[in-house]
Image (cartoon, rainbow, N blue to C red):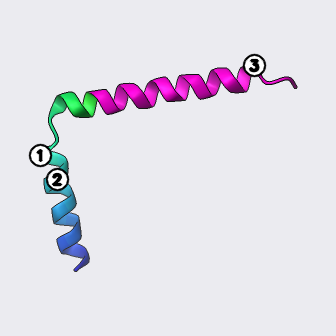
Amino acid sequence: MENLAGVNLSVNLEIIPNEVSLTLMEETRVVTVLINNADVKQPR
């Protein structure tokens, strides 16, 4: 069962268009930057 789940996951990942993957990566990077900025602005 675990093997089947792994195969299904990799197939689904391959189906995702490159544009969508790039968009998700960009959004993740932006969120990370926002979180880092928030941490910097916090009073120590």
Query: In the figure, 11 relative to 19: above or below?
Result: below
Q: Residue at x 26, y 76 (%)?
A: 2
Q: Quadrant of residue 6?
A: bottom left
- Mark 1 and mark 3 residues within 8 Å of each other at the beta carbon: no
Q: CA distance from mark 1 to mark 3?
A: 40 Å
Tag 3 near tag 2, CB within 8 Å: no
- In the rendered view, would you say 33 is above or below 14? above
What amino acid is found at the position of numbered circle 3 in the picture?
Lys
Q: Earlier in the sequence, mark 1 or mark 3?
A: 1
Let me know if residue 18 is in the magenta part: no
Instruction: Kindly give the residue lying farthest to the bottom in the view shown.
Output: 1
Q: Is residue 3 above or below residue 15?
A: below
**Left or right side of 3 for 34:** right
Q: CA distance from mark 2 to mark 1?
A: 5 Å
Q: Where is residue 11 drawn, in percent x and y?
A: 13, 55
- Residue 15 circle label: 1
Pointers 2 and 1 in contact (C-beta within 8 Å): yes
Amino acid bearing label 1: Ile
Look at the image and give the residue range highlighted in magenta.
23-44
Disc 2 marks which residue? 12
Spatial CA distance of label 3 from label 2 is: 39 Å
> Which quadrant of the figure contains the C terminus?
top right
User: According to the image, label 3 marks what residue?
Assistant: 41
Label 1, secondary structure: give it. Answer: helix
Q: Position of residue 20 (x, y in %)?
A: 23, 32
Q: Residue at x 57, y 23 (%)?
A: 34
**Label 3 neighbourhood size at 10 Å, few (<14), some (14-19), many (20+)?**
few
Check disc 2: other Cα within 10 Å, few if <14, some if 14-19, many if 20+. few
Is-magenta flag for residue 33? yes
Looking at the picture, how far across and down is residue 40, in whole percent? 73, 21
